[in-house]
Each structure stands twice: as C-alpha cells, then as structure tokens.
Amino acid sequence: MRRMRVLFAVALVVLAAAAVMAQQNAPAPTGPVPAGLPEWAYTPPVPGAPPPVTALPNDDNTNVSIPGTTKTFTRGQLRAAKETMDWWPEDRRGGPVPDLARFGKQGVRQCTLCHLPDGSGRPENAPISSFSPTYFMQQMQDFRNGLRKSADPRKANTNTMIGFAKAMSPEEDRITAEYFAQQPYPRRMKVVESKTAPKVRMQGGMHMAVPANEGGGMEPLKAGEFVEVPDDNLRAEARDTRLAWTTYVPPGTLNRGKQIAAKAQCATCHGANLEGIGPVPALAGRSTSYLTRQLFDFKTGARRGPWGELMRPVVANLSVQDLMAAAAYAASIQPPAAAQPITTSAAR
C-alpha cells in the first residue's frame, strides 16, 4: 500500500511536468488511418452502406415506452432537438442538471444528448459520469489545445467535441464537470467469453444486434474483433440510462487482459479494482469499445495531453490485441461505488 501511494505521488508530479510539456507541443497533424486500427471499436462510416435503420417509430407523434416506468415520450421528443428526455430523473444526484448539459447553447449541443443524463454515454462516445472534475476539465483543455483527437480521422463525433470544447469557457467546464462527477457509473456492462456473437449492423451510430425477424442470430466471432451491443435496440436509441450492454469476446480474453493489466501495473494509478484514485479515472465497468479506443489513441499519440504522456510508455509495447484484452478485463469489473439499477428486456 505504501509503495502504491509513493508511485501515485510520483505519477502526479510527472503529470504536472507533462502538462507543461504537452502545452508546448504543436497540434498533432491529421493524417491517414493508422495501421492496426481496431475498426470494430471506432465504427467508421462504410462507403455505400444502406441507409441506417431505427428501432424507433417514424412518426414524431407516436408515443414510446420502455420497461419499468409509466413515463412515455413522443418520437419527436426523443430526437432531443432542444432538450434530452430523461426516463429516470429520480436517479440523478447533486441537484438539477446544469443548463449547458441540459439545453446546450449557441454552437454547443447539450451534453446529455450524447453522454446521456447520467453521463454514462454509449459505446460510440465517452462515459463521463464519476470522473474527477480535475480530469474532466483537463480533457476539455486538451480538446481546445489540439492535444486530444481520435486516431481515426473519420470519427466525426470526436471532431464535433473539439468544436464544442472551443466554444465553452473554463467556468462552463467546471459547472458541467461538477455535475457529472456526482453521477455514479451504473453497473450495466457485461463481458461474455464466447466463440459466437450476434450479427450486427450500424444503427443509431453504434453496433446493434440484428433482430431475429430481420435475419439476425449468432455467428462466429470474427478474428481480431469484439462485439459490443445493447441488450435492447429501442431502449438504446431512446437513451435509456438503465439499459444493460454486452460485449462478446473470445474465450481466454479476460485472463489475458488480467495478466496484461498486472504486468502494466494499471492498479498503481487506477486502483486495485481499477476504480480510480483521486483525479485518475476509473476504468472498471466502462465500455469495452471506449476503453479500446482510448488505449489505441494513447499508443498512436492521438491523445497527447498530460495524461497521454503518462500512458504512452505503458501501452507502447502492447499489441492491439493486448489493448483489447486489457479493455475487456477492465470492462468486466463491477464498479465498487453505489450503482444505479438496470432493467432488462429482449433485444429488438
């Protein structure tokens, strides 16, 4: 324990020095897609792909309901043109949602549109709930300074986030960060070792299982890929924060990931159960896709802020498969903090 505290203190000193160096670096150039990019985690657009489908009704006046609540919203309300609908406002902590997070402002969409009212996000973007305000605010500054991008230049929502960060003030960062820091990350991620996984398609900006009545079903898990899908397609598109998600990984992945995490000494900074320490973010229970992207972004230098300077030597000699296994292992760990309930229903 004493060794961990010493190493953590050293890490913070290095972080402070790295922050100064990172600010002096020129912005990373936008370039081609790097070799080895795990496309399953980045879900880039596919040229010539058919128009996206949706599990939500086409008519904006149609009411939508989900299991566990009598609340309903129309399809039009769920488009969140001005405000993100919240199915479970009783789960929120720390007072009302700040106006910027709830409504947005000129040039900035509301945070809850992509990151959801509890900040838990979905695989295509970042989970920001329970992050330390210090960490949160540093990431916003990195976006502004060109120090945080996506390794995949085709990832449009990261480029959009950079624009939002530049349109926000440090005070708006702080208010937003303090709200999301009070929202516990829910226990909703499952990792299943399997030789097969659901057949998927792009839907709502993320991978979703193809319903059985549309030709879906289980198929062999492709080499070098994981499959992460919501347990219910409609609830995912409706931004239900109590929805469970499942990642399918090959047998042996979790043990491999555990060994990699131990060898890389992830627990030194992220905690014995990867629950985070101080400003160091929690990894436990986060999306496998998200964690894989961040590790690959660190490895390629797309994330070059002060946290990137700490992480780069950790991931430098790890293969993409190593990064994926470590991400799956972290995602499989149940967060130790008080968690929000989930409700389950068959995928549709």
Image (cartoon, grey):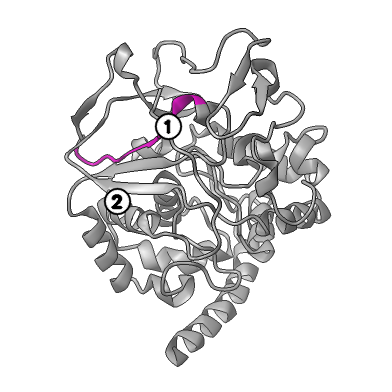
For this rendering, which residue is in front, 46 or 34?
46
Tell me where residue 193 appears, x and y as whole percent: 23, 47
Q: Residue at x 29, y 41 (%)?
A: 226
Distance of mark 2 from mark 1, alpha carbons? 33 Å
- The disc at residue 283 is none
Q: Nearer the viewer, residue 286 or 124?
A: 286
The image shows residue 61 at horizontal and vertical percentages of 68, 10
Considering only order in the chain, which callout, 1 or 2, is on the residue closer to the N terminus?
Answer: 2
Residue 345, disc: 1
The crowd level at tag 2 (other Cα within 10 Å; few <14, some 14-19, many 20+) is some
Q: Amino acid at mark 1?
A: Ser
Residue that appears at 28% across and 41% down: 248
**Most distant residue in the top direction:** 59
Say which element carries label 2. helix
Residue 116 higher or lower than 346, as above or below: below
Q: Which residues are magenta?
A: 223-234
Residue located 36% across and 74% down the image: 265
Disc 2 designates what residue? 320
Q: Is 234 on the left or on the right of 214, as rendered?
A: right
Name the spot of residue 105 as percent of width and height, x first. Answer: 82, 35
Q: Nearer the viewer, residue 92 or 5?
A: 92
